[in-house]
Amino acid sequence: MSTRTEGRPEEDTAGTARRVCLAAVTAALSLGLMGACGGGERGDAKEAGSEAPATPRASSTAPSSTAPSSVAPVLAATPRPDLTGIGASGGKALTQGELDRAILADGDVSGFRSGPMDAPPPRGENADRSECLPLTAVLNGKPEPLGKAVAYRQLVGPDSDRPAVSEFLTTHGVQDASTLLNRLRAAVTACADGFTASGGDGPSTYTGVKRLSTVKAGDDALAYQLTGDFEGDPVPLVFHLVRVGGTVATFYTANFENGATPLMPPALLAAQATKLT
């Protein structure tokens, strides 16, 4: 991890460029952009940030486990008690319109706002090892087997728009949805020591992958942390997936501040599973 000297104008400029670039990474969803931010000059970082989607406004950082002001509101969040399901638990293949109605909206979880998020760019990154390809497919916002329909959302929390959580909802059919989670489980194990990826805007390095505890929701669930490398600093990326019938909800958040595993609000997963059931 690089050392920084406080109070120097050039360091302040670099810090601003870094924050702009990381905001672009979060808003754009596809983590392949990390390569472009990490390898470019300060001007490149500013340019990347200027093109990032801006709705809704979200912090580039997720709260760390040691930030009480951020953690307390997140843990207190609850799903709206009158949420109803759309019938995906029976294996129904949801249409695009049904996905759009089922994905989390304003008011579904206390304190959280939902807004549109652009689909990721068509060109994503690919792991240099075949066994790790399921992980980069999720990074690209296109988990495989590819869904027949997909909806994207950005969710922002109650503490100064933190945490910032990206969600994509995909419909596959029960067999493909189960295959998706099983391939990811295998990839988490096979790629525990990390891997490199290319094909996006620049090369990316991921130093490790590990399983996390899951929230009990839906028919199946998986959670894992993928640790990226940003100019020598660890960047924990956390993914939680919940399957209801043939539909998979994928939630992603990151911590660009201090290397601690970011918290995924459990109420988001519970509410989404309820709306799909």
Image (tube, rainbow, N blue to C red):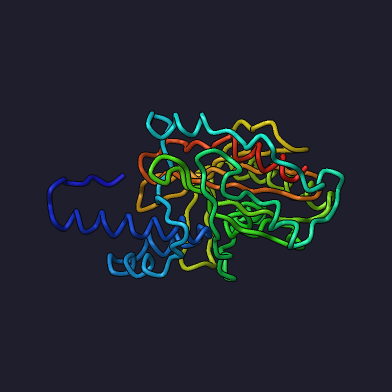
Residue in front for this viewpoint, 106 or 126: 106
Q: Is residue 178 visible?
A: yes
Quarter of the image for the N terminus: give it.
Answer: top left
On screen, residue 80 above or below 34: above
In this picture, is 10 found above or below 186?
below
Residue shown at 46%/32% (left/top)?
Answer: 73
Residue 128 visible in the current orientation: no
| Quadrant housing the C terminus | top right
From this viewpoint, which residue is outermost toward the left?
8
The front one of 19 and 234 is 19
Q: Quadrant of residue 199 in the image?
A: bottom right
User: Is 163 positioned to the left or the right of 122 in the image?
Assistant: left
Position of 174 relative to 264 (above/below): below
Is 6 left or right of 61, judged from the image as shown? Answer: left
Relative image position of residue 134 (x, y in whole percent):
66, 53
Residue visible at 51% across and 48% down in the picture: 113
Q: Where residue 195 appears, x then y in whole percent?
A: 54, 51
The number of callouts visible is 0
Q: What residue is drawn where x is 70% and y is 51%?
A: 102
Residue 204 rendering spot, x and y as whole percentages: 47, 58
Residue 15: x percent and y percent?
25, 54
Quarter of the image for residue 275 reads: top right
In this view, the residue farthest toward the front is 82
Residue plotted at (53% across, 54% down): 154
